[in-house]
Image (spheres, coloured by chain):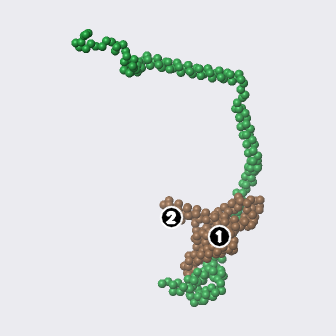
Chain colours: A brown, B green
Amino acid sequence: MTKKFRSVADQHRHRVYTFAYYSLRNREEAEDVTQEVLVRMWKNWEELNEATLPAWINRVTRNACIDAVRRRRAYRTRVVATGDGEEMLQGISIEPGPDATVEASELRETIQGALASLQEPYRSIVILREIQDMKYEEISKNLELPLNTVKSYLHRGRRMLREKLTGTLDHESF
Amino acid sequence: MNRFEKNPNCLWVRERIESFLDEELGADALTTFHSHVDVCAECRRELDRAKRVLQELHALPELYCPDRVVDGVMAGLEERPRAAGRNRFADWFGVLRPALAGVFVLLVVVSALWVLDRTRPQEITPAEVAEAEAELIWTIAYLGDISRQSAMTAATQAFDTGMLQPVRRAVDAAFETESPANRQSPRNQQSPKTPPGGGSV
């Protein structure tokens, strides 16, 4: 059973990790989320089947990322509340360091930052559709949202990204 | 007055840029869109920005998840076989649980019946009934005797301590004043007083 689990985990881990990384923009947190998702998958192994697994993985991954963002916010609030927060925050690796960053242009890096700063569900929908190339129907099923709502959120999410990036885009292109 | 108020078509186009990029505009809308973008530099620039963002998003790569992530999970699962060994008892216990519950209920029922049987009253013989009656009569008589003795003792003590003296006096006084016999007493029937100066005629 563990052999089969390993095989399925290998099949899905990159997708989970990619989603987590673009949501959190931090490699360690993305690895933690991926592990968390795989452990949950093992715990629910008996109930899962091939047909429902991808949707289940997407849902659990998204929830794990939302939890990670909440934990991060709570931690930041706690650290700042202790008084000498600014100094301590400088030691926290929330943004990726130079080694951790995906090799990318400045614009690509800025886009990643803007993407991670989007609110839910815009962030998830943009990642699933534009980066992970998922169909609208799948996104709608995974996030349990009506199809038209998914389309509307996607357009709004992209527009928000554009607004965040206007300065950078103008600087690069014009 | 902002630009959109000058040209309402700008607002119309801005709202449809994403649909245009997703090729969701109908033929008429597409014509209107193109005809405006061709003449409006600002909207053309906005469209270029949107295209660029989409391009960059599509260019973001699927990332490789390091092997250590899955290795870590699998290492954690190594504990599972041992855990499974421990859980075998739990699994059997789970299967046997209804049977064990049945045995427990049976034990409770049997114990209850046994206790009820022991506490059930035995058959009583006529001799025992007679004995019980005699004991009851004796008890009633005894209690009557005690109460009588108590009453006598209380009365004697009341007389001895003079507690009833005021009562006795009150009763005597009542007899003296109210009783008709008292009014007809011999003392009152003595010869009437001779009027003053009067004698026999």
Secondary structure category for the residue under label 2? helix
Separation of marks 2 and 1 at Cα, in angstroms: 39 Å
* Res. B86 mark: none
Q: Quadrant of residue A39?
A: bottom right
Q: Residue at x 52, y 84 (%)?
A: B4
Secondary structure category for the residue under label 1? loop
Q: Residue at x 56, y 19 (%)?
A: B145
| Picture mark count | 2
- Whether residue A75 appears in this view of the structure is yes
Nearer the observer, B198 or B85: B198
Residues at circles 2 and 1 in contact by the CB criterion of under 8 Å? no
Q: Which residue extends farthest front?
A: B201
Mark 2 and mark 1 on one chain: yes
Nearer the observer, B93 or B54: B93
Q: Residues within 10 Å of mark 2 (few under 14, many from 20)?
A: few
Q: Residue at x 58, y 63 (%)?
A: A70
Q: Chain of mark 1?
A: A
Q: Viewed as shown, does residue B68 lie left or right of A110?
A: right
Seen in the picture, residue B76 relative to B56 is either above or below; the reply is: above
Q: Quadrant of the C terminus of chain B?
A: top left
Q: Which residue is mark 2?
A: A86
Q: Quadrant of residue B32?
A: bottom right
> Could you say where residue A12 lies in the image, as x and y percent from the top left?
71, 67
> Could you say where residue B53 lies in the image, as x and y percent from the top left?
61, 78
Q: Residue at x 39, y 19 (%)?
A: B180
At label 1, the amino acid type is Leu
* Res. A145 mark: 1
The mark lying in front, picked from 2 and 1, is 1
Mark sitting earlier along the chain (2/1): 2
At label 2, the amino acid type is Glu
Q: Residues within 10 Å of mark 1 (few under 14, many from 20)?
A: few
